[in-house]
Image (cartoon, rainbow, N blue to C red):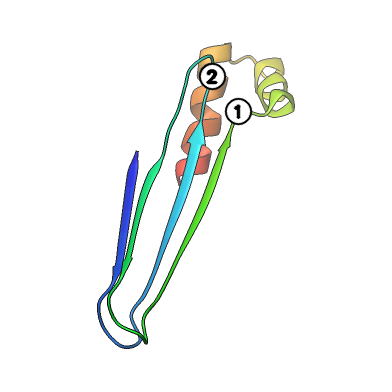
């Protein structure tokens, strides 16, 4: 995943929020933050984690398969 934000003018504001969910794999994030004006403000935040086990179990208790439950959790994070 690559997230890009640039601050090129006075008062420009930008933010890159990188959130990766991993399950039995490897994940990397490549944020690209560029500020070329002294009055611009650009920030970056990153988090890498896994699907919350309790949320997964709750959704499965309501009849979802493990794969369906993971999809619901990920879609909720992306909204």
Look at the numbered disc 1 and give the secondary structure of its residue: loop
39 with respect to 50 (left or right): left
Res. 35 image quadrant: bottom left
Expressed as whole percent of the image width and height from the top left, the position of residue 27 reads 45, 28
Residue at the spot 32% in from the left edge and 44% down from the top edge: 2
Q: What's the mark number on residue 38? A: none
Q: How many marks do you count on the picture?
A: 2
User: Residue 44, position in %: x, y?
Assistant: 47, 59
Q: Residue at x 35, y 86 (%)?
A: 11
Q: Nearer the viewer, residue 71 or 31?
A: 31
Residue 61, quarter of the rendered image: top right
Residue 63 point in image, percent of width and height = 63, 14
Labelled disc at residue 50: 1
Estimate the spatial distance between the alpha carbons at disc 1 and disc 2, rounded to whole Å.
6 Å
Q: Residue at the far top: name it.
A: 65
- Up the image or down, 25 lies above or below 29; here it is above
The answer to whether 37 appears left or right of 51 in the picture is: left
Name the residue at 51% across, 18% down: 68
- The quadrant of the picture occupied by the N terminus is top left
User: What secondary structure is marked by label 2?
Assistant: loop
Q: Which residue is mark 2?
A: 23
- Circle 2 residues within 10 Å: few <14, some 14–19, many ≥20: few
User: Measuring 52% from the left and 25% from the top, which residue is drawn there?
Assistant: 22
Q: Could you say where residue 5 lies in the image, as x and y percent from the top left?
A: 32, 62
Frontmost residue, 15 versus 55 = 15
Mark 1 touching mark 2, by CB under 8 A? yes
- Vertical comparison of 5 with 76: above or below: below
């Amino acid at each position: 995943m690559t997230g890009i934000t640039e601050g090129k003018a006075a008062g420009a504001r930008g933010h890159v929020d990188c959130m990766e969910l991993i399950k039995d794999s490897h994940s990397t994030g490549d944020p690209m933050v560029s500020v070329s004006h002294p009055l611009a403000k650009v920030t970056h935040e990153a988090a890498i984690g896994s699907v919350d086990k309790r949320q997964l179990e709750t959704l499965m208790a309501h009849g979802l398969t493990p794969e369906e439950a993971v999809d619901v959790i990920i879609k909720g994070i992306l909204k």
